[in-house]
């Protein structure tokens, strides 16, 4: 019984392995690029190596190393053949075809096709004469899909398109057809098909690599171009990581996320959705707490302690100081989301197996765990946008007020920002004051409900890229307004 339960947990390993393999590939790519850079420009290579000790790349490197180690250790437990074929299909041509001559009087002439049946999404058959094509061959009298023989004629083509959940009309590891030609002359049969990866969930691996390399590249460019702003941002990130609140938030977050696996939600089989909802809310609140604490310590306390005056005595403008602090807050929020977000994805995969075991359900497949894990990503992206917006607000408040007022104001804005739609809806009543307050909040406060799609995430509804784009635009515009307010408030602030 114990080995059986242990084997069930192995189903959740492949999705986590895909993330770890993507991290490993990103590390290898960075090492290769750094080696080439060190050979061409030794000084730049030394500076790139020294950047690992700054506030952002250091924790990011440790995170990728941990997941890379998990990928190496768990490799024997992963169906590498399935994942490898799916990755190979992503890089190959998806549309192809072949032309076959069916001999006169042929009966069930075998035609082998160059793809696996599980990859087929559409099939088209054409002929220049009447023939019969069989698309399904029983194995020992048992058929997975019942597809009748196709009677082709010169004036009509036969098409088949695969719908969601439908099985292909082929059996075995290699697709094949059988053609019967009743005429006394050869017939030309044209076969066209379109393929897709058997396991599209394997795309987690390249997407993880792309995201990590994009973040690393953008951070490297950020350190090279606005050097003074980057220096302030790096110092802010180091200061945030050195604060006890950062370590407490990460430890508490990781502990609670793993505890969510075994917590019974009593949702009649929907515990996975509740875990995703609870996990997204937890990460958002912890990241907001860390960002607001960092903004208060790095801005308000520096102003009160005259540290800001010492910093600004150097060739550094107040505008660069504020922008550097904001960039540092973004890096801190990104670190929290990368660390806790990766843990949430792993616990989601594990929760699928745990929920099936506790509910006496059929054991899920690894692709089911991967599908649930993928649905968390849009929620993490939108939550990060929300925290960046609130970071700009917190920075503006920190230019004039201390930590306690900053925490109170920002958490009030957080609460009211999520209640704005309800307030606006209630403003249609008869009370003029309610209508006025609702319209005022809707105009001044950020509408944070734009970044809350937990209902779609837990329901498995696809979030379109256009929605993410509009949400990012809204967060960018509101953050720009908040930064302008911060610059105005800080410009005439007496630092002496």
Image (spheres, rainbow, N blue to C red):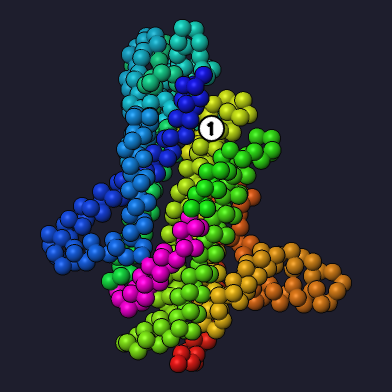
Q: Which residue is mark 1?
A: 353
Q: Residue at x 53, y 69 (%)?
A: 292
Where is residue 409? Give x, y as percent: 62, 74
Q: Where 373 falls versus 338 (above or below)? A: above
Q: Where 447 falls versus 123 (above or below)? A: below
Q: Residue at x 81, y 77 (%)?
A: 433
Q: State the residue in front, 13 or 465.
A: 13
Q: State the residue in front, 270 or 61.
A: 61
Where is residue 213? Give x, y as percent: 33, 55
Is 73 positioned to the left or the right of 345 in the image? left
Where is residue 495? Give x, y as percent: 46, 90
Can residue 366 be found in the magenta stretch? no
Q: Residue at x 35, y 24 (%)?
A: 113
SS at circle 1: helix
Q: State the residue in front, 252 or 467.
A: 252
Quarter holding residue 46: bottom left
Principal secondary structure, stretch drawn in magenta: helix
Magenta segment: 225-250
């Amino acid at each position: 019984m114990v080995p059986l339960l242990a084997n069930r947990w192995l189903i959740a390993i492949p999705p986590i392995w895909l993330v770890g393999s993507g991290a490993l590939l990103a590390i290898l790519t960075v090492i290769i690029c750094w080696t080439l850079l060190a050979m061409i420009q030794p000084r730049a290579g030394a500076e790139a190596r020294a950047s690992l000790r700054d506030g952002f790349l250091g924790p990011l490197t440790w995170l990728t190393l941990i997941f890379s180690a998990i990928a190496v250790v768990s490799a024997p437990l992963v169906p590498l053949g399935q994942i490898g074929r799916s990755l190979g299909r992503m890089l190959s041509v998806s549309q192809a075809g072949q032309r076959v001559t069916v001999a006169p009087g042929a009966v069930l002439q075998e035609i082998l096709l160059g793809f696996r049946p599980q990859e087929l999404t559409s099939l088209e058959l054409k002929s220049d004469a009447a023939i019969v094509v069989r698309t399904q061959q029983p194995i020992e009298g048992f058929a997975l899909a019942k597809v009748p023989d196709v009677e082709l004629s010169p004036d009509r083509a036969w098409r088949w398109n695969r719908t969601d959940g439908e099985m292909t009309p082929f059996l075995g590891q290699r697709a094949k057809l059988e053609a019967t030609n009743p005429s006394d002359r050869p017939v030309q049969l044209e076969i066209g098909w379109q393929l897709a990866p058997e396991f599209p969930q394997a795309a987690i691996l390249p997407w993880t690599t792309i995201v990590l390399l994009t973040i690393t590249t953008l951070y490297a460019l950020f350190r090279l171009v606005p050097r003074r702003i980057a220096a302030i941002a790096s110092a802010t990130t180091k200061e945030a990581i050195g604060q006890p609140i950062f370590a407490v938030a990460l430890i508490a977050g990781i502990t609670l996320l793993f505890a969510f696996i075994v917590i019974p939600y009593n949702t009649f089989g929907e515990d996975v959705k509740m875990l995703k909802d609870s996990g997204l809310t937890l990460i958002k609140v912890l990241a907001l707490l860390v960002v607001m604490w960092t903004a208060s310590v790095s801005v308000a306390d520096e102003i009160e302690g005259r540290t800001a005056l010492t910093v600004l005595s150097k060739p550094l403008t107040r505008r660069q100081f504020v922008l550097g602090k904001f960039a540092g807050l973004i890096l801190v929020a990104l670190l929290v989301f990368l660390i806790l977000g990766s843990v949430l994805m792993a616990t989601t995969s594990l929760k699928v197996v745990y929920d099936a075991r506790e509910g006496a359900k059929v054991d899920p497949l690894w692709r089911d765990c991967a599908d649930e894990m993928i649905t968390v990503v849009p929620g993490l992206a939108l939550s990060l946008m929300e925290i960046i917006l609130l970071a700009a607000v917190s920075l503006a408040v920190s230019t004039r007020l201390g930590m306690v007022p900053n925490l109170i104001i920002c958490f009030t804005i957080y609460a009211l920002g999520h209640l704005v739609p309800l307030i606006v809806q209630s403003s249609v009543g008869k009370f003029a004051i309610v209508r006025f307050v609702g319209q005022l909040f809707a105009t001044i406060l950020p509408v944070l409900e734009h970044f809350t799609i937990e209902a779609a995430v837990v329901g498995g509804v696809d979030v379109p890229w256009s929605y993410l784009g509009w949400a990012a635009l809204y967060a960018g515009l509101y953050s720009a307004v908040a930064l302008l307010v911060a610059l105005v408030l800080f410009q005439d602030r007496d630092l002496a």
